[in-house]
Image (cartoon, rainbow, N blue to C red):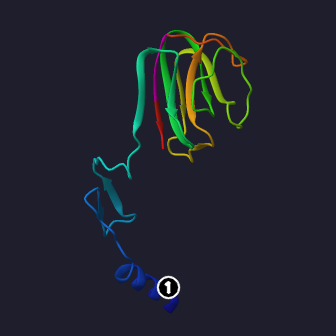
């Protein structure tokens, strides 16, 4: 019983609380409530990449990184493909897998497509992150200049 009292005393008086301008913590509620405030800090936020309003692809990141989410809105039914690459591949067959240059994700067909890892561990890309829209299935890339593409990565 004394052990639990010692833990309670430790948590009440010795547990460090760090508060910055970007957050506030209200002690006395269980669990403690936390409020996040808007910030422009790149260490806290995820900068988006927006690629045009009528494009066929987008280099989201030209180095290795993490993909948190990507979406495409199109005027026609398309497939959204994400590649482990620093450039948008040319038309032709695709190779699935996580190796450099390979297609890692493919969803569709639809006019509104979304891949999201928000709230989950992000997907890791060893080379770069590129997204493209195609009018054919996941096995063949046929670029379609018809989409707005938006991505979140670090």
For the residue pair 99 and 29, the one nearer the viewer reads as 99
Q: Is residue 99 magenta?
A: no
Direction bottom: furthest residue: 2
**Mark 1: few, some, or many residues within 10 Å (few <14, many ≥20)?**
few
- Point 57% across, 32% down: residue: 86
Horizontally, residue 27 falls left or right of residue 54, namely: left
Q: Residue at x 49, y 92 (%)?
A: 2
Query: x and y percent of residue 77 in the render?
Result: 56, 10
Say above or below: 13 vs 98: below
Q: Position of residue 64 (x, y in %)?
A: 57, 43
The one nearer the camera, 93 or 77, is 93
Identify the residue shown where x is 71% and y is 37%: 99
128, 54: nearer the viewer:
128
Image height of 3 relative to 19, above or below: below
Secondary structure under tag 1 reads helix
Q: Is residue 111 visible?
A: yes
Residue nearest the viewer, comparing 82 with 15: 82
Tell me how many marks there are. Answer: 1
Predominant SS of the magenta segment: strand
Q: Quadrant of residue 102?
A: top right
User: Is residue 138 left or right of 144 when viewed as pictured?
Assistant: right
Q: In this view, does 2 lie above or below 145?
A: below
Circle 1 residue:
4
Residue 128 spot, x, y in % from top left? 58, 37
Residue 1 in sight from this viewpoint: no
Instruction: Name the residue at the top extreme.
Output: 76
Q: Which residue is farthest left? A: 21
Instruction: Write down the region rendered in magenta.
Output: 146-150
């Amino acid at each position: 019983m004394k052990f639990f009292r010692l833990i309670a005393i430790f948590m009440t008086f010795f547990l460090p609380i760090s508060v910055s301008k970007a957050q506030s913590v209200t002690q006395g509620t269980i669990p403690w409530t936390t409020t996040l405030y808007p910030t422009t800090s790149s260490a806290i936020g995820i900068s988006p990449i927006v690629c045009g309003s009528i494009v066929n692809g987008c280099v989201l990141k030209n180095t290795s990184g993490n993909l948190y989410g990507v979406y495409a809105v199109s005027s026609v039914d398309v497939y959204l493909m994400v590649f482990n690459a620093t450039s948008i591949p040319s038309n032709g067959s695709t190779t699935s897998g996580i190796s450099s240059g390979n297609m890692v994700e493919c969803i569709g067909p639809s006019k509104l497509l979304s891949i999201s890892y928000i709230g989950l561990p992000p997907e890791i890309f060893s080379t770069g992150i590129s997204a493209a829209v195609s009018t054919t299935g996941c096995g063949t890339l046929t670029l379609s200049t018809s989409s707005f593409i938006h991505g979140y990565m670090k």
